[in-house]
Amino acid sequence: MSDSKQVLRLQIERPSYGPQMIAKRDDGKTILVEGAMPGDLVEVEILKEHPRYSEARTLRVLRPSSQRVAQICEYIDICGGCPWAGLDYADQLSYKRQSLLDALSHIGKITAAEQVSTIRPQERTWAYRNKVVFDLSPTCGKLKLGLHARRSSRVIPVEHCPLLAPPLQDLPQRLNGALNYLFHGHGDDLLRVQARAALHLPSFELALWTSTAPLDRALLAKVIQDALPRPGLTSLVRVLVNPRRQVRGVERLAGSGYWQERLAGYGFKVSAPSFFQVNTAAAEGLVEAVMHQVDGLGLAPDSQVADLFCGVGSFTLPLAKRFAHVVAIEKTASSLQDLRRNLKDNQLGDKVQVYGDEVGHRLKLEGRYQLILVDPPRSGLDPAARALLLDARPCYLIYISCNPSSLARDLTHFLQDGYRLRQLRPFDLFPQSYHLESLCLLKDSR
């Protein structure tokens, strides 16, 4: 039960893998504290008690940590987008690497400090996000674009966000008036607003996620284009969503109807519902590191290679440049369509066999694989996919992870079944947050 009146004075020790910080009560019980930084001496209010830990929020910082840095955004204390923004960047990298080691040790019972490399710093730690999704906050009869509060579904109206690429930073100021005019001050039909701005190309897309109710598309396109600076907007689309929030289609309202970017030398066209890494520069470093590992394996060009959970083809395209035949598996309809288009545009379509399946029986049909690359969602591999990979038994497995906990769990299964960990390299694709990517290379030692 929660006890909102219990107030404690605590010394913050270190971050959790999440927005909260870890402290210890006098009796040794762990307290997860929001709104603090490592090294702070804080006064906290207990929000919820659990058998093994408690949750709390900071009331006052009594003595700030030496690891704190000046805040550059007025929303840092309330917005959930960059919970580590008050922490020195070098310390962020150190804590991220440690969070990976902790997950491997505590969840996977894996000791891998020698295989886990340090994280290379990113040159751009602010203004790097190529994508933003704004929710709607009805305020005094008007719609305002906003972002989610920390650990809450509440939407905070914002005027700008310094984490975003420059073309995206002040979108709320430019769009709020236009959206209120179009949707009459309520968000019954408008669910969210998504925008993407490319790093390497003059591509800027705005996507309005709406219900399937009829809209005056010509009026919508004119009002939105008039509200945004020129030149700028290259694509305006409407993503139609049913009451269950499932995508039913994408309508082109103006421009190309898709967003474009270059990544590691390849051109990509990406539909509004499709996933693409939000930090283009850092993602390029990840792709280049993966391909450097692939090149170091010394595999023949006619080797059997597969890319699972391949999305729009960030790894599929460079793999197809190296091998005569690649199997690519992706189940999301929009990503699958984008993948086929990107392969064709980059003249690689004849080298890739694309399957719109769950990761499944296709692996059994293709014989022995020399290399399989997997880039699963945050939840990691489900038991069926993990079993199929072990059954396919590739000589080498490259696992790209965005969650240390699910990576540690999955690695345990591979190591117990005869795979050996060759390298584990963390990447910082999300400065100012606790998230990290990991590149893991496994070799079959049986």
Image: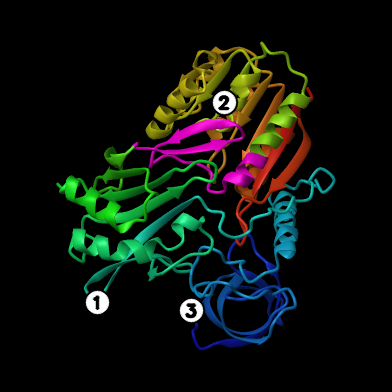
Coordinates of residue 176 in the picture (x, y in percent):
30, 65
Identify residue for label 1: 140
First in sequence: mark 3 vs mark 1: 3
**In the image, residue 61 lies in the stretch drawn in magenta:** no
| Residue type highlighted by circle 1 | Cys
Can the viewer see residue 154?
yes
Residue at 64% across, 70% down: 21
Label annotation for residue 317: 2
In the picture, residue 23 is in which quadrant? Answer: bottom right
Q: Is residue 162 above or below residue 121?
A: below
- In this view of the protein, which residue sits in the foreground, 153 or 174? 174
Residue at 57% across, 54% down: 128
Identify residue for label 3: 2
Alpha carbon distance from label 2 to label 3: 52 Å
Coordinates of residue 99 in the picture (x, y in percent):
70, 56
Coordinates of residue 202 in the picture (x, y in percent):
47, 43
Coordinates of residue 384 in the picture (x, y in percent):
53, 31
Left or right: 304 in relation to 93: left
| Residue type highlighted by circle 2 | Leu
Quick check: marks 3 and 1 in contact, CB under 8 Å? Answer: no
Residue at 55% across, 19% down: 327
| Residue type highlighted by circle 3 | Ser
Alpha carbon distance from label 2 to label 1: 49 Å
Q: Which residues are magenta?
A: 256-285
